[in-house]
Image (cartoon, rainbow, N blue to C red):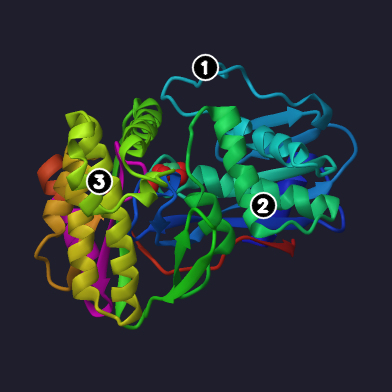
Amino acid sequence: MTAGAAESFERVFGARPPGLQCARAPGRVNLLGEHTDYNGGFVLPIAVDRAVRVCFRAAAGPVRLWSEDAGSWAAFELADLRPPPPGGGAPPGDGAPDWGAYARGVAWALQEAGHRLRAIQGVVSGDVPMGSGLSSSAALEVAVGTAFCAAAGLQIDGRALALACQRAEHAFTGVRCGVMDQFASIHGRSGCALLLDCRSLDFEEVPLDAAAVRVVVCNTGVRHALGQSAYNERRASCERAVERLSRRLQGVRELRDVSPAALRREADVLDAVTLRRARHVVGEIARTVEGADALRVCDYVRFGHLMFESHASLRDDYEVSCRELDLMVDLARGRPGLYGARMVGAGFGGCTVNLVSAEAAGEFARAMASDYRARTGTSPEVYEFRAGAGAEVRAC
Ligand code: GLA
């Protein structure tokens, strides 16, 4: 893969200079804990063995990055970076920001954090499916951020890099995302899920026994254009819930501070929709903590129940699922070897994540692809992932 990246660099820049490096940052699959990160809650992602790569070198003059996938350049001066005005930076037709916005945003956020960067030239490539809820954008941010840090000789703490990438996304794409995706891409550990406390950013590696279970991801291929504004709306609902609940409950700064029992008691302070949104978040945080306990003792049956509960809550209370995701979860239910299934990521399309016994995983993947095709006429991509390592830089 790195040899290929160096060849691409030579093709694009006309030379293969010594000292070329490759920054690699993986996508992620979240096993449990959806829409909890921006509420100070817990998440349980794995980094996957698919990644975005930047083959680069430090160079004078403007930053010049070529994307193999988009077939386009991002070129900018480090001194000239400014976020677009709110609502600006008009995304192209499908509602997704242009890939260069992520690269510019990361350079801007690192400089805002006080780091002195050097310009780079590089070629960006990758195999994280885009727009599928597997965090191809966070992988891009982290790969570019890792390349900038390496080029400038900066040793940045992983938490600080994750926060800079998150800030880049807020400022340059207008999506008020949490920190889970960037964090998982940086701190992923082979064979482990990460139980991340999104308030303190402390985390624990929870082993996932690959001899016993596999993570199978089914991609509906659906991408809803309104996903980004709906995401920000959900976040605003959570903030509204906190504002109201904190009038009655002491010490409530985020939904993390509200227990399921307290929410039931104080339900009348919220309108019906805001109550449903808060109920998802508060329940999902509790499920994630319980799920980590279940994983620690290899109780996959319990973990699977929690995944199904999570899906129902995302569908009915948080309302971020869609017909295709619900169908994919229903098709998985009851299949040999399946422990649990649910939609993954922000929602409004994308993928489901399934926890399947290792011996049944191959047959499960085949059956899911053929049943979904029979029901919809569309062939879904199905991936079997292993928990992989986080971002790194290597010689090309
Ligand atoms: C997106 C965001 C994350 C997180 C998930 C939902 O992936 O980038 O921060 O909020 O949605 O859990």
Residue at point 48%, 44% (across, down): 178
Sort mark 3 into few (<14), some (14-19) or many (20+) by Cα contacts within 10 Å: many
Helix, strand or loop status at disc 1: loop
Sort mark 2 into few (<14), some (14-19) or many (20+) by Cα contacts within 10 Å: few
Q: Is residue 354 magenta?
A: yes
Q: Is residue 49 magenta?
A: no
What amino acid is labelled 3 in the image?
A: His
- Which residue lies under the disc numbered 1? 87
Helix, strand or loop status at disc 2: helix
The numbered mark, 3 or 1, whose residue comes first in the sequence reads 1
Q: Choose mark 1 or mark 2, whichever is in front.
A: 2
Helix, strand or loop status at disc 3: helix
Residue at point 14%, 46% (across, down): 327
Q: Which residues are magenta?
A: 344-371
- Which residue lies under the disc numbered 3? 280
- Which residue lies under the disc numbered 2? 160
Residue 17 visible from this viewpoint: yes
Q: CA distance from mark 3 to mark 2?
A: 29 Å
Give yes or no for contact between labels 3 and 1 (Cβ–Cβ under 8 Å): no
Viewport quadrant of the N terminus: bottom right
The answer to whether mark 2 is within 8 Å of ligand 1 is no
